[in-house]
Amino acid sequence: MPICVIGPPGAGKTTLSEALGSRLSASVLRPRDLADSAAQRYPAMAGLFQRGDAGMISDDALGLALRISLEQHEGFVVFENLPWDVVQLADLYRAAGRALRVVSIDGPDELLLRRRAGRRYCPRCYPRPAGHHSDSACRTCGTQLIARPDDEHHAFVRRLHQRRAATTKILDYAAALHVPVVSLSADHKLAAGA
């Protein structure tokens, strides 16, 4: 049963995905996890999953990695920041049918920009969250936390608008497929046991 958590940067996708994964005893998979896993499973195709200068893989390669992942997992799985587009949603729907769920999380620009200013990541643990951390070191491995290059103000605002546009298309297509969608506010607090 795939649960997809989508929305713009800074909305809280990682926090929500980790909470869902913990409560459902589910794997939490991110785009980079999928690419790394696909490259390890099919070494002859590893070159397809190499990251570009911005650390991203192509949409086509991500779609292939998603399809490979769907072959490997049973039960609950939480896809953080996936699907990336409507074709990937169609792949998920084809594999999971009525079991597919989408959670969309978003908030006002001011809130997301404020969160962006304070975001840090661990270059060693990324894309996995750095866990509960101080402002300077990852509690998982102790590495110095740094600001993400794509969190620079103009890059972040561009990503914010791109992901919102993509999310709108995904949600429209989900409605056409009758895929259940839960919409949450970025300032939503998860109730204990929910």
Image (cartoon, helix red, strand yellow):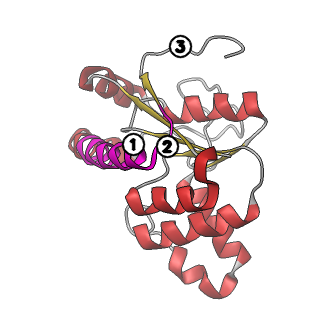
The residue positioned 50% from the left and 66% from the top of the image is 62
The span shown in magenta is: 159-181
| Whole-number angstrom distance, CA of label 2 to CA of label 1 | 6 Å
Q: Amino acid at mark 2?
A: Val
Pinpoint residue 77: horizontal percent, then vertical percent. Answer: 69, 46
Indicate which disc, 3 or 1, sits on the residue closer to the N terminus: 1
Question: Which residue is the site of mark 1?
Answer: 175
Question: Which residue is the site of mark 2?
Answer: 179
Q: Amino acid at mark 1?
A: Ala
Q: Quadrant of residue 8?
A: top left
Mark 2 element type? loop
| Whole-number angstrom distance, CA of label 3 to CA of label 1 | 25 Å
Which class describes the residues within 10 Å of circle 1: few (<14), some (14-19), or many (20+)?
Answer: few
Mark 3 element type? loop
Q: Is residue 57 above or below residue 147?
A: below
The residue positioned 49% from the left and 43% from the top of the image is 179
Pinpoint residue 114: horizontal percent, then vertical percent. Answer: 32, 22
